[in-house]
């Protein structure tokens, strides 16, 4: 299961960011790549928090 999650990340991360940056070597813009990475990280964090709240409720310390 872990390899499946990593495979999805590798599949979406590399080519997706390469497509955002562009192929013109004289005009590489990394701002879109930074935004893509930040939004992806924020979405993953929200998913983890939602799953944590779903499994343990609003308790700060809980054995899951």
Image (tube, rainbow, N blue to C red):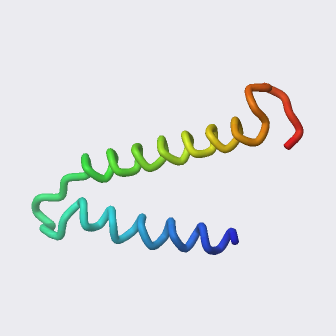
Q: Residue at x 40, y 44 (%)?
A: 39
Q: Residue at x 34, y 47 (%)?
A: 34
Q: Nearer the viewer, residue 56 or 11?
A: 56
Q: Residue at x 10, y 62 (%)?
A: 26
- Residue 61, given in percent of the width and then of the height, sits at 84, 28
Is 32 rendered above or below residue 56? Answer: below
Number of marks present in the image shown: 0
Is 23 rendered above or below residue 37? Answer: below
Q: Residue at x 25, y 50 (%)?
A: 32
- Residue 56, given in percent of the width and then of the height, sits at 79, 36
Is 28 rendered above or below residue 8? Answer: above
Q: Is residue 25 left or right of residue 37?
A: left
Q: Is residue 52 left or right of residue 29?
A: right
- Residue 64, given in percent of the width and then of the height, sits at 85, 43
Q: Is residue 31 left or right of residue 62?
A: left
Task: Quadrant for the N terminus, please.
Answer: bottom right
């Amino acid at each position: 299961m872990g390899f499946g999650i990593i495979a999805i990340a590798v599949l979406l991360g590399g080519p997706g960011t390469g497509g955002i940056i562009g192929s013109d070597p004289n005009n590489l813009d990394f701002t879109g790549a930074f935004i893509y990475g930040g939004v992806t990280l924020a979405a993953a964090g929200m998913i983890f928090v939602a799953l944590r709240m779903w499994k343990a409720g609003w308790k700060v310390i809980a054995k899951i």
